[in-house]
Amino acid sequence: MFENLNVWEVGALLLLALLIFGDRLPAVIADGLRMVRNLRNMARNATTDLSKELGTDIQLEDLHPKAFIRKHLLTEEDEQAIRKPLQGIYDDLRADVTTVHNDLKEVATAADPRTPASSVPSSSGSAPAGGATPAPAPRAASYDEVT
């Protein structure tokens, strides 16, 4: 939460809090911590009550609608039936984008005035001049990893 604050900014915030609250600062901090503890207990109680009502074990992360549907409403076969057409579309789109990306790289390399003409790879797939091996293609993320 405070990872982007340096020492001087934290010191300035503490000095400002001391100026605003004065000698009541320890009581204000204690009240704030008590409020955070109460909020955590309320969230824990709500998830426990919801788990009892639904008859399943629900964690706080499961309350996200996507995770809730996946875990509690869909069977694995239903999820695969929904995912199958989308996986094909995703794979086709990924292949098209990769092809366009490679074509653009080839055009940019050919149009670069700093690159000598002898080192420009041809579209026939031959290795670049100088014995250098081409960089490996980036690993394609699967549909499951993206969603």
Image: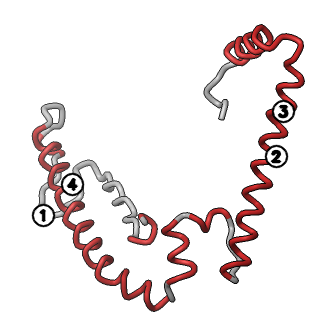
Kindly report the distance in space between the C-alpha atoms of the residues bearing marks 2 and 1: 65 Å
Q: Amino acid at mark 3?
A: Asp
Q: Amino acid at mark 2?
A: Arg
Q: Residue furthest top?
A: 19
Could you tell which of marks 2 and 1 lies nearer the N-terminus? Answer: 2
Contact between marks 3 and 1 (CB within 8 A): the answer is no
Q: Which residue is mark 3?
A: 31
Kindly report the distance in space between the C-alpha atoms of the residues bearing marks 4 and 2: 51 Å
Q: Give the numbered dot on residue 101.
A: 4
Between circles 3 and 1, the one closer to the viewer is 3
Could you tell me which residue is drawn at 66 percent across and 80 percent down? Answer: 54
Could you tell me which residue is drawn at 72 percent across and 63 percent down? Answer: 46
For mark 3, give the secondary structure: helix
Contact between marks 4 and 2 (CB within 8 A): the answer is no
Could you tell which of marks 4 and 2 lies nearer the N-terminus? Answer: 2
Could you tell me which residue is drawn at 12 percent across and 47 percent down? Answer: 107
Q: Give the numbered dot on residue 37.
A: 2
